[in-house]
Image (cartoon, rainbow, N blue to C red):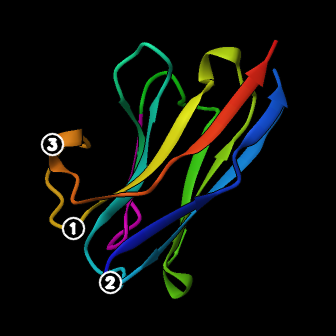
Amino acid sequence: EVQLVESGGGLVQAGGSLRLSCAASGFTFDDDAIGWFRQAPGKEREGVSCISTADGSTFYADSVKGRFTISKDNAKNTVYLEMNSLKPEDTAVYYCAADLWPGSTWSEGEIDYWGQGTQVTVSS
């Protein structure tokens, strides 16, 4: 059974940092795209970032470029999202996601598995 378990969310002041972790089980990192979406209240879910477990190539949404960094540890089957210079508009539930047959886009329709989500709240 595939599972994605997030951790690391919480409450932080604007300008602060958090690190999210996503531990995957039930499959081994091979040639997948693992990453994060987020959904703020009243808004659609948006792709934030992803990383290829094959070659480490990355994608970032424009809204987080230069502030967020995604990384992976293949030996631990874990992906991390380092979030710096956080803004109140980063407040959302962050979901880990896995696309086991990655194509050219990081979009909801391509996701095969989802985590349960972790809340990130940035106060002003």
The magenta stretch is 51-60
**Element type at mark 2:** loop
At 54% across and 35% down in the image, what residue appears? 93
State the CA–CA distance, disc 2 to disc 1.
9 Å
In which quadrant of the rendered image does the C terminus lie? top right
At 18% across and 59% down in the image, what residue appears? 102
The image shows residue 97 at horizontal and vertical percentages of 37, 55
Mark 1: which amino acid?
Leu
Q: Quadrant of residue 1?
A: bottom left
Crowding around mark 2 (Cα neighbors within 10 Å: few <14, some 14 to 19, many 20+) is few
| Residue occupied by mark 2 | 27
**Element type at mark 3:** helix
* Residue 115 lies in the magenta stretch: no
| Residue occupied by mark 1 | 100
Position of 66 relative to 58 (above/below): above
| Residue occupied by mark 3 | 109
Crowding around mark 3 (Cα neighbors within 10 Å: few <14, some 14 to 19, many 20+) is few
Position of 54 relative to 47 (above/below): below
